[in-house]
Image (cartoon, rainbow, N blue to C red):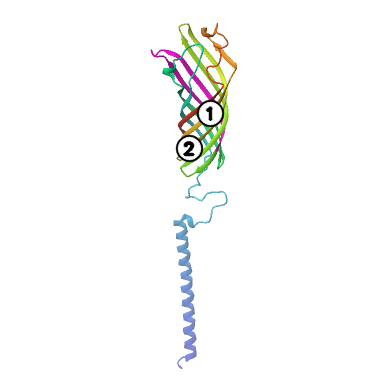
């Protein structure tokens, strides 16, 4: 038998090398496919992107803009003292101005980032006493207003705004004498300007406000009741306050944001 030629041996070696290379390539492709499948199963973020309009599982939603605010506040008004005719209030114990304490309910809406709209109702009360601590008169008022806020500075946790608006006031004054209790009621038109600060948390806000009110009182719809006004003259029935007045109010409160 003749030994195989060199050409035949080289052909067999080449064929064997080709078969081995093909087998190795096939095994590498299969291994890579298995690794990719394991990676996809273990890492949800490697999955196909979520359809438009739907949030990908495992991700947090974007924070929602909170534009509404409803809150309660405590209010202190600094107002001119009463000057009634039907009873005498000793100026030594009253002074030129008095402080009325009360509460308020407010709501705010922010349609655009730099502008806000506010509506609110605020009240205040005070009692006048003489030297013997006897009650001589009491003053109660309720102010309803609507206004606009212009945000001058805004941060992630605080905002500062300048505001202005208008509204109306209901004034009730009670006088106490030996004859009994008498009541005087009248209304007023108000304008206000001021500064407001908001300190923001996730759903809660703390509010501070300082305002100046211009008050125009009207005696055309004044109501009188009680023994002190039965035989009183027109001068005694006059308003116990000036027609044009200025109030200063400071308030602090807490509100819910949504």
Question: Which residue occupies 49% across, 88% down?
Answer: 8
Neighbours of disc 1 within 10 Å: few (<14), some (14-19), many (20+): many
Question: Which residue occupies 48% across, 83% down?
Answer: 14
Q: Is residue 147 located in the magenta-colored stretch of the structure?
A: yes
Residue 157 spot, x, y in % from top left: 46, 42
Which region is colored magenta?
122-149
* Total marks in image: 2
Q: Is residue 179 above or below residue 203?
A: above
Q: Is residue 140 located in the magenta-colored stretch of the structure?
A: yes
Give residue 197's mark.
2
The quadrant in which residue 147 appears is top right
Neighbours of disc 2 within 10 Å: few (<14), some (14-19), many (20+): many
Give residue 255's mark.
none
Q: Which marked residue is nearer to the observer: mark 1 or mark 2? A: 1
Residue 54 spot, x, y in % from top left: 55, 49
Residue extending farthest right: 220
Q: Give the CA separation, mark 1 to mark 2.
A: 18 Å
Q: Which residue has dot 1 on it?
A: 213
Toward the viewer: 170 or 94?
94
Toward the viewer: 79 or 37?
79
Residue extending farthest left: 132
Q: Is residue 128 above or below residue 151?
A: above
Residue 98 spot, x, y in % from top left: 45, 22
Q: Secondary structure at mark 2?
A: strand
Question: Which residue occupies 47% across, 80% down?
Answer: 17
Most prominent secondary structure in the magenta stretch?
strand
Residue extending farthest bottom: 2
The quadrant in which residue 130 appears is top left
């Amino acid at each position: 038998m003749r030994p195989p030629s060199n050409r035949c041996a080289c052909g067999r070696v080449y064929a064997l090398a080709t078969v081995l290379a093909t087998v190795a390539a096939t095994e590498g492709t299969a291994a890579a496919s298995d690794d990719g499948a394991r990676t996809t199963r273990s890492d949800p973020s490697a999955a196909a992107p979520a359809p438009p309009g739907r949030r990908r599982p495992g991700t947090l939603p974007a924070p929602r803009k909170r534009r509404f605010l409803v809150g309660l506040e405590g209010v202190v008004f600094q107002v001119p003292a009463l000057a009634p005719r039907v009873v005498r209030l000793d100026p030594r114990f009253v002074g030129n101005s008095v402080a009325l304490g009360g509460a308020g309910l407010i709501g705010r809406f922010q349609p655009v980032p730099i502008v806000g709209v506010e509506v609110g109702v605020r009240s205040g009360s005070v009692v006048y006493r003489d030297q013997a601590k006897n009650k001589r008169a009491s003053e109660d008022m309720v102010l309803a207003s609507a206004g606009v806020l212009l945000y001058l500075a805004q941060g992630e946790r605080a905002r500062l705004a300048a505001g202005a608006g208008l509204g109306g006031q209901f004034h009730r004054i009670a006088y106490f004498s030996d004859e009994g209790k008498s009541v005087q009621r009248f209304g007023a038109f108000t304008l206000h300007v001021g500064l407001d600060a908001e300190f923001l948390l996730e759903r809660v806000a703390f509010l501070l406000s300082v305002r100046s009110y211009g008050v125009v009182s009207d005696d055309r719809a004044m109501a009188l009741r009680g023994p002190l006004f039965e035989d009183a003259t027109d001068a005694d029935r006059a308003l116990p306050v000036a027609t044009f007045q200025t109030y200063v109010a400071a308030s602090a409160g807490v509100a819910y944001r949504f």
